[in-house]
Amino acid sequence: MVKKLVPAVAALGAAAALLAAAAAPAAAQPNDDVHLLADHVMYTADQTWPYDPAGKMWFNEYGDVVTVCDNDADGHSVYLSVDGGVGHEYGVHVVGGEGKCVTHKAAQGGVYNLPEHGIHFEIWSSAGYSGSVNRADWINDH
């Protein structure tokens, strides 16, 4: 009886492992569409806009989460300027090509803990296309 149970238990264990692996979500990539859930989103305004912007950024007010990504493997960087007033200004420089992202959060303290009022953002590509700078002013009220 024990000899018959061993293969059956082994088969059940293997089946359970396969089901668990199939049900596990795939790891999110930095350039996935998580920005669709953001409070605010902005793209670089470069020569291929709006079809394939060189960079994008998103801002979630809760936690002051600012993420900027390079969308193109073109040898150019993406820059973001964040201005929340005196003592709350910083820049982000994303180097590394397509899919590379940088994130800053209020939990990091200092300049990354943005005040609860209007924040000015500017994003651009180092490619230097005419009119590639995009600007926005958003209220940080969370």
Image: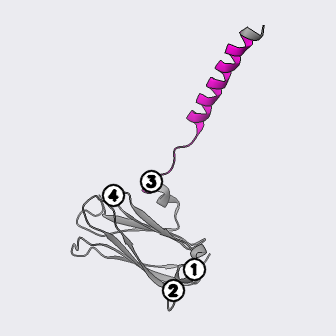
Instruction: Label 3, secondary structure: give it.
Output: loop
Q: Residue 118, relative to residue 35: is it above or below?
A: below
Of label 2 and label 4, which has the lower sequence position? 2
Where does label 3 land, which residue?
32
Foreground tag (3 vs 4):
4
Of label 4 and label 1, which has the lower sequence position? 4
Q: Where does the C terminus fall, quadrant-wise? A: bottom right
Which kind of residue does numbered mark 1 sit on? Asn
Where does label 1 land, which residue?
113
Q: Magenta stretch: dominant SS?
A: helix
Of label 3 and label 4, which has the lower sequence position? 3
Where does label 2 land, which residue?
88
Where does label 4 land, which residue?
98
Instruction: Label 1, secondary structure: give it.
Output: loop
Of label 1 and label 3, which has the lower sequence position? 3
Which kind of residue does numbered mark 4 sit on? Glu
